[in-house]
Amino acid sequence: MSFITDEEKKKARALLSRLSRQEKCEMLSGLDYWRMRGIKRLGLPDYWISDGPSGLRKQVKEADYFGVHESLPAICYPAPVTCASTFDPALIERVGQALASDCVEEDVAMVLAPGVNHKRFALGGRNFEYYSEDPLVSTKMGAAMVAGIQSLGVAACLKHFVCNNQETGRMVCDAIVDDKALAEIYLRPFRAIGKETAVAAMMTAYNRLNGVYCTENKALLDLGRSAGFDGAYISDWGAVNDVLKSFQAGLNLEMPGVGDETTILLERALDEGRWTEDGLDACVLPLLELLVHQAGQGPRAALSWSERKQIARAAAESGIVLLKNENGALPIRTRSVTLVGAFAKHPRIQGTGSSKVNPLEVERLVDVFDHAYYAKGFDEEGKTNEAWCAQAVSLARKSEVVLVCAALPAQAESEGFDRKTLALPEGINEVIRRIAQVHERVVVALACGGPVAMPWLEQVQGVALSYLGGSYGQSALARVLQGRAEAGGRLAETWPRPGLEIPVRPGWKTSVYVESVYTGYKYYNGAQVDVLFPFGYGLSYTTFAYSEFERTGRRIGFRVRNTGKRRGSEVVQIYRNDALPFSTQKLLYFEKLDLAPNEEAVVSYLVQDEDLMEYFDGWVLRKGVHQIEVGSSSRAIHHRFLLETDGVSVSVVPAYASAKNVGRLTRSDFASLCGREIFMAENARKPYDQNVCLNDLMEGGWMERTLARWLLKQVPARQGELLQTAPLRILKMNAIDAATRQGLLDLLNGHVVRGARHVDWRALLAFLKENT
């Protein structure tokens, strides 16, 4: 069913003819930071948009880029990384319904969720806000979230289209991707969700794709339309590089609003014949449809607050992954427990950046384990000292179980920058090691938004990963640790060992995707690289047996039995894993089974042509033998079926024949794969334009370097890291007028007197202060 009804589309078309040209041009840029402009004389009120991957972030006073200013209190739901590890689309649809209920209560028309970008490498700064390294998991979870959000008439906005896979230099970086990887990995969730759901909007990414900014990449936007997406394309905040080119390419809405600057520019383009009225109408119509839809929304059956709270807790619980459990360390069946770590009192519940929620309430593990000893051990930055460490060791000796609450500190992972290392703070590692030397039953409860190193893994008996569980994740964690709930989560990403990550490093001006399709488990398993934990992995408090494997034609079947003594869940996974050159392991199907002791389920799956096809200058079915694997992780394979197809033969660039070659791939190999020369962007030189960054200035003359250093001194180090690669045009989205922006450009290009006369330094300093 379409999100916009036929009747709403008909009404929008009728209203389009009643708009003046100026009104149409005004609609294409936001009213302000969070609102799309309505047409009040036609009964269409302004349209409120808010962030929301982990909960509603509605800012009604001061708006900002990174969640610095406070938003209205709301439930903080488990982060997408946690939601993905549930492997339960039905539950994630309920999370979407709960989030939509928050939107209904606060009169929010569109929520900027879900994010389905691919986790290209383990250190991606925004990985906590995305689902998986596998496109099928991202598709199923993203589609479920869209269905849940839109079930109450709230518009979902799928993001970020496409290849926004790093935070380093994200606003200027050029993602150079070959066609095969683009089709099979990066575009797949967007195209599938655009086709399978009636998602209302899609957000274009900051970065360039193969040389063209995504906001003005007509081929990219047309590709989304060809897949069936008929909603509105909305720019990421400040992502528009060239206003006219963006709307000519098919963008519908520039966000945030920038006064009348865009309106004046577009009207001039129409007057001069550089744009057409038909083009303008085509851009406006999807926005009118959204306004008509929202204006027609009456009272809706929002879920109660208690229902939303229950859903949030259920998702957090279902997403907890049991990584290690030796010698019956878990579940904890004693009241003799010592809690260690400041995170027991101040838990990590969410990521940082535009998804940051102002939580209505936050549970604490010390309150749930109110009978336990508590030792600080280390603070929220992961730092320790001898006194804290000694107290932790002393109190550990007094209990039967030590539960160390470890976490990656909030400042270590955020939108705006990528992580530098897999390591936890050394203070946390030191405390765990010291306790493990004197205690036999140490369990680590780990909270983070992505993989971390565990140098102490062999010294502890249990590890429970909650990722980022939201407002009610601590009671969910306690239920799993105490055995009152099943450890039902599975990893939707590979956890690599330090130094053995996929050999890619994001460049700030150009990021060459040399590895092509060899990403995530497709690389680690194909290259037989040792990992900490494989994709799909997770332990249970019970055991399962697979049996009676059979195949009839392309239909495969088998049975799964709970052979343990308690109820539990198993995530069945079916993969294609061919030995053909330039082919990778591919998840075809997953299903979460909930089984009582001795209960069994029959699983049946029909292998489709689509499952076997690969992209080589178009989708083809290759001739050869295809291997279908049944497993409980990407490496725990219980049975293999062989299917032979009479397809086509394809030629493969030799360097890309095997995942084992990835570490040796060169830019020359990649150029052969792409069929074109690969150019690396250089730092900008005079005369500078609106995309000049502080990093460019640091390599310029004395005046440029002085200005860059002065600006960096005005902000904290982390924000400074982002500002180093933020282009000058970012000032536009922060209400810095065109005169000041041009004045800065004049200064940088040597026109000192003219430039200084136009720069509003007070406004510039206010921007730096408000956004840090």
Image: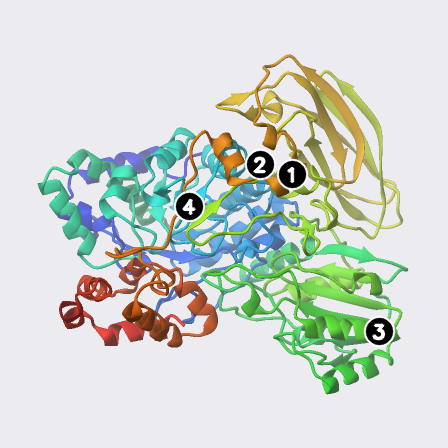
Query: Can you tell which of label 2 and label 3 is closer to the viewer?
Result: 2
Compute the Cα span from label 4 to label 2: 21 Å
Residue 168 is situated, as x and y percent measured from the top left of the image, at: 47, 56
- Three-letter amino acid code of the residue under disc 1: Lys
Residue sitting nearer the eye, 604 or 276: 276
Please say if 537 is above or below 589: below
Looking at the image, tell me whether mark 1 or mark 3 is earlier in sequence order: 3
Tag shown at residue 522? 1
Compute the Cα span from label 3 to label 4: 60 Å
Identify the residue position indicated by label 3 in the image. Answer: 335
Identify the residue position indicated by label 2 in the image. Answer: 517
Query: Can you tell which of label 3 and label 4 is closer to the viewer?
Result: 4
SS class, disc 1? helix
Query: How many numbered markers are drawn?
Result: 4
Looking at the image, tell me whether mark 3 or mark 4 is earlier in sequence order: 3
Can see residue 502?
yes
Tag shown at residue 680? 4
Residue shown at 39%/48% (left/top)? 681
Looking at the image, tell me whether mark 4 or mark 2 is earlier in sequence order: 2
- Three-letter amino acid code of the residue under disc 4: Met
Query: Can you tell which of label 1 and label 4 is closer to the viewer?
Result: 4
Circles 4 and 2, Cβ within 8 Å, touching? The answer is no
